[in-house]
Image (cartoon, helix red, strand yellow):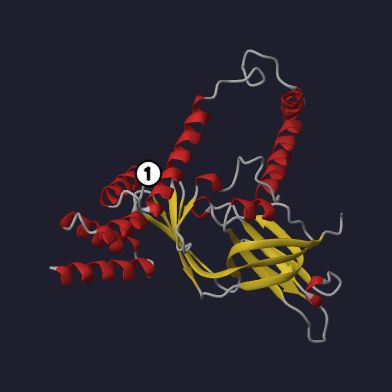
């Protein structure tokens, strides 16, 4: 039986590392059901848990077997902190400024101004204004390097990662990461494009950043554009070009890195360091596969270091 148990667990670990999350989950759950005292199996069960309730049940079992297990205690503390933060937010009363019985604030009045202007215009003019406003809103949504005061993008306060970053989970999705290798890549150069990636199923992917050097950073020599997370360049120069051009699809390693990425502007000189990623698989919390982001011709990167070396506007 011990040999069968060991083989099952090893097969589960192998499947998990290969990105076969469903297969690994079935094997691990079968193991802990048949051998509820298998401490190692319970620690791996935490890697395939799909929601907070399941995580708490697993941690409770781990601590019953080893009450002083440091990793489980830290994980439980983090879950409790997230729960407290969520409860405080939901129970926070409306302030005077937010109360519907009060007059709109000055900021609220400014935000309402376009709508008041719209209703005061003739129908044809109002329609043109509405179309223009929608177009402008769409442009800023997909192009502006901003989280819009935290309203958009991933909430890194509620994201949990495994020690190896091979699994990242949020409240509604989890992702399996396959890296290209163990080493890190460094990209130093001039930013010719930066924009947010706004794909719900892959919200841990936050930015497209086009980093260029030498001839590719000179707009008089090379024209560049980024469309649908792919870059295009062209040049009328007949001589061979010198330098490099790389489009980075960024996954920030933590909240601090994400906030640093939000400060990057076109024509900044940056130094970005991280691990190359081959693929990202997305699942919802019911373990339903949603799709795969595969790195083809660009550089999907788990970014763990961002430095703006030079900003021409400062």
Instruction: Name the residue nearer the viewer: 97 or 74.
Output: 74
- Residue at x 61%, y 17% (from the top left corner): 100
Residue at horizontal 51 percent and vertical 29 percent from the top: 88
Q: Quadrant of residue 230?
A: bottom right
Choose top left, top right, bottom left or bottom right for residue 134: top right
Identify which residue is drawn at 70% across, 44% down.
135
Q: Position of residue 128 (x, y in %)?
A: 74, 37
Quarter placement of the N terminus: bottom left
* In the displayed structure image, the side of residue 314 where residue 287 appears, left or right: left
Residue 242 against residue 93 in the figure, above or below: below
Does residue 97 lie above or below 71 as drawn?
Answer: above
- Helix, strand or loop status at disc 1: helix
Report whether residue 268 is seen: no
Q: What percent of the width, then of the height, locates residue 191?
A: 75, 64
Tell me residue 296's x, y (percent): 55, 72
Q: Residue at x 43, y 39 (%)?
A: 80
Quick check: 104 left or right of 63? Answer: right
Residue 241 visible in image: yes
Residue under label 1: 52
Q: Is residue 140 above or below residue 298?
A: above
Q: Is residue 194 above or below residue 134?
A: below
Kindly give the residue lying farthest to the front in the view shown.
68
| Quadrant position of the C terminus in the picture | bottom right
Residue 175: x, y in percent? 45, 58
Between 88 and 277, the residue placed more toward the observer is: 88
């Amino acid at each position: 039986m011990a040999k069968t148990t060991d083989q099952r667990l090893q097969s589960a670990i192998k499947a998990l590392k290969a990105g076969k999350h469903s297969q690994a989950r079935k094997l691990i759950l079968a193991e802990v059901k048949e051998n509820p005292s298998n401490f190692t199996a319970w620690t791996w069960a935490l890697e395939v848990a799909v929601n907070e309730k399941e995580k708490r049940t697993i941690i409770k079992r781990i601590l019953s077997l080893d009450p002083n297990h440091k990793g489980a205690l830290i994980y439980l503390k983090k879950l409790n902190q997230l729960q407290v933060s969520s409860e405080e937010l939901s129970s926070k009363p409306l302030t005077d400024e937010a109360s519907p019985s009060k007059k709109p604030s000055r900021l609220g009045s400014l935000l309402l101004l376009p709508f008041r202007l719209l209703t005061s215009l003739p129908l044809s003019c109002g329609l043109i204004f509405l179309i223009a406003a929608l177009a402008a809103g769409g442009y800023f949504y997909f192009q502006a390097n901003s989280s819009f005061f935290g309203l958009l993008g991933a909430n890194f306060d509620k994201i949990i990662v495994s020690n190896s970053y091979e699994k990242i989970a949020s409240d509604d999705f989890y992702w399996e990461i396959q890296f290209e290798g163990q080493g890190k890549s460094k990209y130093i150069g001039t930013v010719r494009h930066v924009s947010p990636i706004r794909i719900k199923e892959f919200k841990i992917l936050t930015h497209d950043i086009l980093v260029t050097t030498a001839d590719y950073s000179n707009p008089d020599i090379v024209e560049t554009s980024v469309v649908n997370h792919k870059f295009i360049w062209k040049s009328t120069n007949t001589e061979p070009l010198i330098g490099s051009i790389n489009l980075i699809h960024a996954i920030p390693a933590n909240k601090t890195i994400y906030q640093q990425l939000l400060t990057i502007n076109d024509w900044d000189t940056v130094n970005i360091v991280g691990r190359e990623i081959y693929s990202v698989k997305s699942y919802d919390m019911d373990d339903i596969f949603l799709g795969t982001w595969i790195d083809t011709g660009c550089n999907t990167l788990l970014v763990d270091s961002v430095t703006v070396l030079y900003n021409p506007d400062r």
